[in-house]
């Protein structure tokens, strides 16, 4: 289980600052969650203005 960022993401970057395990990274203007690092805490979903990070 891990969180995944969907296409609603506007690349604001708020979630990346919140993640304690630095699982969120940006590449070519899009944000991704590394499922190997994500500990399913849900903080990214809490700060995201468009609820793009979803639990799988
Ligand atoms: Fe990071 Fe938690 Fe979001 Fe996973 S659920 S990417 S650990 S903030
Ligand atoms: Fe995308 Fe939401 Fe993260 Fe902003 S907080 S970069 S909109 S997933």
Image (spheres, rainbow, N blue to C red):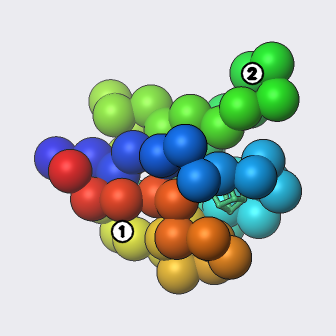
Residue in view at x 71 percent, y 32 percent: 30
Q: Image quadrant of ligand 2?
A: bottom right
Residue 27 has which mark? 2
The residue tagged with tag 1: helix, strand or loop? loop
Q: Position of residue 21 (x, y in %)?
A: 52, 50
Q: Which residue is mark 1?
A: 41
* Left or right relative to 3: residue 13: right
> For disc 1, does the CB lie below 8 Å from ligand 1?
yes
- Nearer-the-camera pick, 45 or 9: 9
**How many numbered badges does the structure rendering display?**
2
> For disc 2, does the CB lie below 8 Å from ligand 2?
no
Q: Position of residue 27 (x, y in %)?
A: 74, 21
* Left or right relative to 18: residue 42: left
Spot the residue most to the front: 8
Label 2 vs label 1: CA separation?
A: 22 Å
When asked about the image quadrant of residue 12, the answer is: bottom right
- Nearer-the-camera pick, 20 or 50: 50
Residue in view at x 27 percent, y 59 percent: 55
């Amino acid at each position: 289980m891990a969180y995944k960022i969907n296409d609603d993401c506007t690349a604001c970057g708020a979630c990346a600052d919140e993640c304690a395990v630095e699982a969120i990274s940006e590449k070519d203007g899009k944000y991704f969650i590394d499922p190997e690092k994500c500990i399913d805490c849900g903080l990214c979903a809490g700060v995201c203005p468009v609820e793009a990070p979803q639990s799988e």
